[in-house]
Amino acid sequence: MPKRYLRYLLDTSVFSQPIRPRPLPACQARWQRQGDSRLAVPSIVIAEIEYGLFLKNSDKLWSAYRTILKGRLTGFDFTAPVASVFGEMKSKQTQIGKPVDDFDLAIAAMTVTHNLTLATLNARHFQLIEGLDWEDWSMGIA
């Protein structure tokens, strides 16, 4: 499906749900209601998930990841336009005295660059970022 139909960019906390031992039902339901064609994943989220998989060194988890998640959604890379938005966002956060982790800020920059809404279970990581449209998918709505 063309990128113009995308609505959400998934944070690691949401994207990893299908391979978690106890996925959050509200999050799973929202994913299912939206459908894969409306969702995208940043390359940084892939890096975070694969980092965790390498640390855990579990054949079972790697198999689940490859079967259920890998290549499932449209992916977005950290491009020059995203880098520019990232730089501006990081500057603003520093100026207002509310720094945000660089990976979270990069995910936010991708969300803003592509005019999407960020789906997360970690609202506290993203609520400080000005201009970011985000939703907490731990709630059973939408």
Image: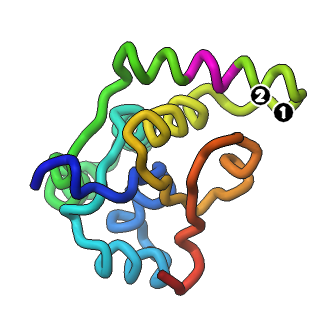
**SS category of the residue bearing label 1:** loop
Tell me: 141 left or right of 35: right
Describe the element under mark 2 as helix, strand or loop. Answer: helix
Residue 54, visible in the rendered structure = no
139 shown above or below 134: below
Q: Which numbered tag is attached to residue 98?
A: 1
Asked if residue 74 shows in the view, the reply is yes
Q: How many marks?
A: 2
Amino acid type of disc 2?
A: Gln
Residue at (41%, 53%) from the top-left corner?
10
Q: Relative to the observer, which residue lies in front, 110 or 46?
A: 110
Residue 66: % across, % down: 17, 51
Residue at 29%, 78% in the rendered image: 32
The residue tagged 2 is: 93
For the N terminus, the quadrant is bottom left
Q: Is residue 124 left or right of residue 141?
A: right
Q: Toward the viewer: 29 or 16?
A: 29
The residue under label 1 is which amino acid type?
Answer: Lys
Q: Are marks 1 and 2 in contact (CB under 8 Å)?
A: yes
Q: Earlier in the sequence, mark 1 or mark 2?
A: 2
Q: Residue at x 42, y 71 (%)?
A: 21
Does 27 appear in magenta?
no
Residue 68 coordinates in the image, percent (x, y): 20, 61
**Magenta residues, start to end:** 86-90
Q: Position of residue 12 (x, y in %)?
A: 46, 49
